[in-house]
Image (tube, rainbow, N blue to C red):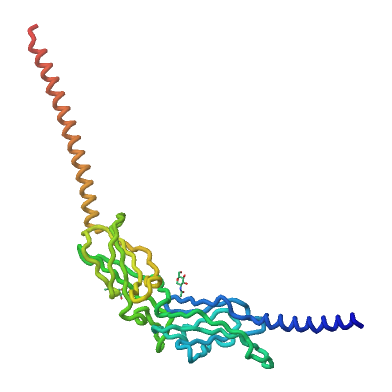
Amino acid sequence: MASLKIVLYLGVYLSFRITAMAENNVPKAENVHWTSLDFKTTLTWTNKPYKYRYSVRYTWDERDWHDCPDCTLISATECDLTACLNASDRTYMADIQTESLDNNLDTDDLPHTFSPTFNLYKESNISTVKFTVKRKDDSRVTVNITDTLTGIHQNGKQLTIRDVLKKDLEYKIIYYKSGSTGKRDMTSHLSVVDVPNLDAGLSYCFMVAAYISSRPPASQHGTWSQQQCTKEESHVHDLKIGTWVGVVFSLAAVIVIIVTVVVLCCRTQNKTIQTSQSSQPI
Ligand SMILES: *[C@@H]1O[C@H](CO)[C@@H](O)[C@H](O)[C@H]1NC(C)=O
Ligand SMILES: *[C@@H]1O[C@H](CO)[C@@H](O)[C@H](O)[C@H]1NC(C)=O
């Protein structure tokens, strides 16, 4: 009898344990973090939602919470919030709610996880910018930068980083004589920049990055571009070739003169010897 009781108790205990374990298996979003490049913003987390779904809500004042339609009842562990968030200077927080597909289940107890706060205007990374370089005159090179497109669409138009950052956008330009280590830099609010005070005829190399001085230091600089160099001016090249041709001609001329002088000298000497011999009395 006693042993039957023990088995019964054990059974009841085990079934409670199993229920508890099942509850613990409800997948709670973990390791939540934001990634954002050129204002395309994604929230990612871990824990696959087997039999469950996730819904993301967000707030910027911690009072009103908003749904993001593309991020509701999803089975993925990441969601693109670009279309829901506003790229103005505000601090967002998201909440990832685990949701059950089973309507009979009490959904109040399901877990949720808050994201870290995120200000995409200040923290979105800016990728490398495309640009061209061209000699303007003897002392200036024009750097023509293309404002990168962002992930944000507004009224059917894809916005550029200049549309979003407006007066806060600057470009930083580093430049140096090709082959030299001395670097100079300048910043400009413009996309077409004339770099002044350069030496005529020499090749210069340029690197460009977006620069947002109003941001915290960690996110001020966009990624630096690959360098682009101007060509050495062609008339300088011609001049150099001319110099070499000159040197070769001068050398040839010197050799011709030496040979001529030597030949003439020998002839004169021979004549002198012959003359002196013939003038001897027989
Ligand atoms: C920006 O880029 C840095 C370096 O790659 C990375 O560590 C950081 O997480 C990125 N930030 C965002 C918001 O994507
Ligand atoms: C800069 O480049 C763009 C195309 O990338 C071109 O339309 C524009 O005319 C260029 N501006 C100057 C001043 O060269």
Looking at the image, which is closer to me, 135 or 34? 34
Give how far across and how far down residue 150 sits, in percent.
41, 79
**Which residue ends up furthest to the bottom in the rendered image?**
104
**Which residue ends up furthest to the front in the rendered image?**
2
Q: Is residue 253 above or below residue 191?
A: above
Give how far across and how far down residue 205 sits, in percent.
31, 61
Q: Is residue 185 above or below residue 25?
A: above
Give how far across and how far down residue 114 sits, in percent.
54, 82
Q: Is residue 227 above or below residue 75?
A: above
Q: Is residue 217 visible?
A: yes
Residue located 61% across and 77% down the image: 47
Q: Is residue 104 left or right of residue 275?
A: right
Q: Is residue 106 above or below residue 225?
A: below
Q: Quadrant of the C terminus?
A: top left
Q: Is residue 101 left or right of residue 45?
A: right
Residue located 37% across and 75% down the image: 215
Quadrant position of ligand 2: bottom left
Q: Is residue 148 left or right of residue 41?
A: left
Residue located 18% across and 38% down the image: 253
Looking at the image, which is closer to me, 236 or 37? 37
Looking at the image, which is closer to me, 199 or 99? 99
Within the image, what quadrant is residue 78 found in?
A: bottom right
Q: How many marks?
A: 0
Looking at the image, which is closer to me, 7 or 80? 7
Q: Is residue 231 visible?
A: no
